[in-house]
Amino acid sequence: MKIISGLFDSGVLQRTGEDASDASITGKCKANGPVLARVTRDGAELPGFDGVAIGQAEKGRFSARLAGLPVGGPYAVELQVGGEHMTVKDVLVGDVWILGGQSNMQGCGVTADGEKPHPLVRAWYMDDRWAVARDPIHNMWATVDQVHIDLCGGVRPEKNMARSAGPGVAFGVEMQRLTGVPQGVIACGHGGTSMAQWDPKLKGLGSRSLYGAALRRVKKLGGQAAGLVWYQGCSDANPEAAPVYTKAMQALVRAFRRDLNAPALPVVMVQIATVYGMEGFSCWNDVQEQQRRLPKVIPHLATVPAIDLTLDDLIHISGTDQTRLGRRLAAAMLWLRTGAGLPAIEPKKTKVIYNKARATADVVVTFDNVVGGLRAAGRPWGFSLAGDGPENVIFRVDLDGNNAILRTTLPVTDIGERILYYGEGCAPYCNITDGADRAVPVFGAMPLSEPRALTPYLRVPLVSEPLPLQDSITELALPTNLDMQAREFPTTLIDIHLDAGRAKKPRVQYFACRLRCAEAMKLALLLGYDGPVKVWVDSKEVFCNPKGVNPAIPDESSTPLDLTAGEHEVLIALDLNGDRAWGIYLRFERKDVTKGQLKKGEFVLPEML
């Protein structure tokens, strides 16, 4: 007797939802008749498997179904047809996983630093042999699939025992710890491969295609797998492949689920990490962002960040941190399958806050799915704010629960057009995780706020000289016959503090502008001020705050305005507050536009004259 598929020495059979085996077995034999099975564990016969018929043999072949073996083992399975018999030893029942992708899955970390083997974690090595999983599990030099030889120029690669650590062994060991059942991993990765080379449309080439070879290996084990673990994307970070990366991943996952008859096959993949010496990074970040967003377009898929992990060369994760990565992949897979734990950390929202102590902007980034608060070994780092103007505008990052607070050198008025990134570039330094050692993902470009229909800040107002203030700002009446001159200011703050001198008596200064509305509009008058203030629009009082004090904060107040088509006059009185007031910020926001109009830019703003 000889087994062709489904049951091999030292192997792992995929369990069913009832925590038992249901393995399809095929083989060759000369005898005809029923296939009988006798199963023992620790030398004792397993109840119900004392020579039970599990299949049929005829015309030189047999097929059988070994169902009902409880999770665990190891089992010895004796098969008999007539006078022929054979025994398959050291069989386990648990979960079996497909490992696919390129070099970081194949394993290039220092082997001695990788995960240590566990007797209940097995690997289906590339020479179609089960054994305890220990790196290198991708023993490419012994592969039986021609594609791996073809991709190496038609020559079998040499052994590399020193640099072979990947995440597969650690994933299996951690899954065994989390589930308590045996684990098996099927080594299918190949370094440097692209999504085009993994294209399921090449399945017809069989073992001369990556997808065909992976499918053959799963089919030889009976065609069952608990899920797919994937690490690939570096080879697609180029102008040709990056734009179609998401579609390629959708096609690959769809094919595995179809061909394994597993519509909800869980998939856990790694977000590619860092690479040194690469010029230009837009495609690298593009692939990372697509990978981060894949769970939104492919059901039952989770993405695991690796941006904080150390390397053993220019691009390959170190043996030590491949163990960390394997554990992260296992935690993500457990969440996908059982709901235990949380999904990946995700940026939720941003908020710009005025920092009074420094008169600059802080950016608060709030994250979802954080376990035990954000943390970092040493100074938290990894964020950037891209845009026109100076670079390196973040000088400190503070972590507070699920918030990262970015301390910047920018004034609030200059930060609105900046774009937020975490992990920008090919080789950023990023070190923020949560209490479960799960990394913050690479993300961006992310705007700091939702799109808004905002005018620029007023910079050319009409300005009066400082004038005596007889009463409080509350009692101040609308003035007439003001002498006002147009002045242009170099900053968004209309700064008049040098106008005032050091007068001892209360004084007020006026600012005015005209608005032209091409159509009726619902607006908000956004005002920042550092003294008591009053506002009139078309000679009607619309806002007053007698308690205004330093500093002037942009957009501190928002006053609703319903304006008709045509021109309108805005007049602002600022109590100079004992010459402590410096000035005002003024701009307008249109509030009656839809999100669709904002996205397309299909709206008009009032024109400041």
Image: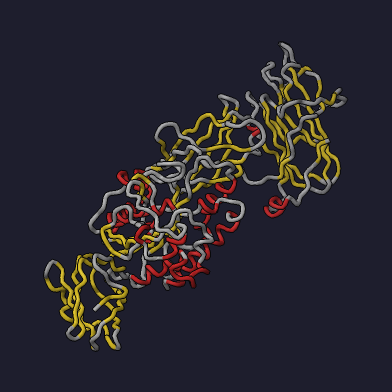
The residue at 70%/33% (across/down) is 527
What is the quadrant of residue 488 in the picture?
A: top right
In the image, residue 171 sits, relative to residue 504, either above or below, namely: below
Q: As drawn, is 50 to the left or to the right of 60? A: left
Of 475 and 79, which appears nearest the observer? Answer: 79
- For residue 358, say whether it is visible: yes
What is the quadrant of residue 317 in the picture?
A: top left
The coloring applied to the image is secondary structure
The residue at 31%/73% (across/down) is 6
Q: As drawn, is 210 to the left or to the right of 74? A: right
Q: Quadrant of the image for the N terminus?
A: bottom left
Q: As drawn, is 41 to the left or to the right of 442? A: left
Q: Residue furthest right?
A: 481
- Residue 405 location (% of width, % of height): 51, 35
Q: Residue furthest front?
A: 155
In the image, residue 50 sits, relative to residue 529, either above or below, namely: below
In the image, residue 259 sits, relative to residue 601, either above or below, namely: below
Of 243 and 605, which appears nearest the observer? Answer: 243
- Residue 223 location (% of width, % of height): 37, 72
Q: Quadrant of the image for the C terminus?
A: top right
The residue at 70%/53% (across/down) is 594
Count of picture labels: 0
What is the quadrant of residue 311 in the picture?
A: top left
Q: As drawn, is 309 to the left or to the right of 542? A: left
- For residue 269, say whether it is visible: no
- Residue 555 location (% of width, % of height): 66, 35
Of 65 and 90, which appears nearest the observer? Answer: 90
- Residue 184 location (% of width, % of height): 31, 62
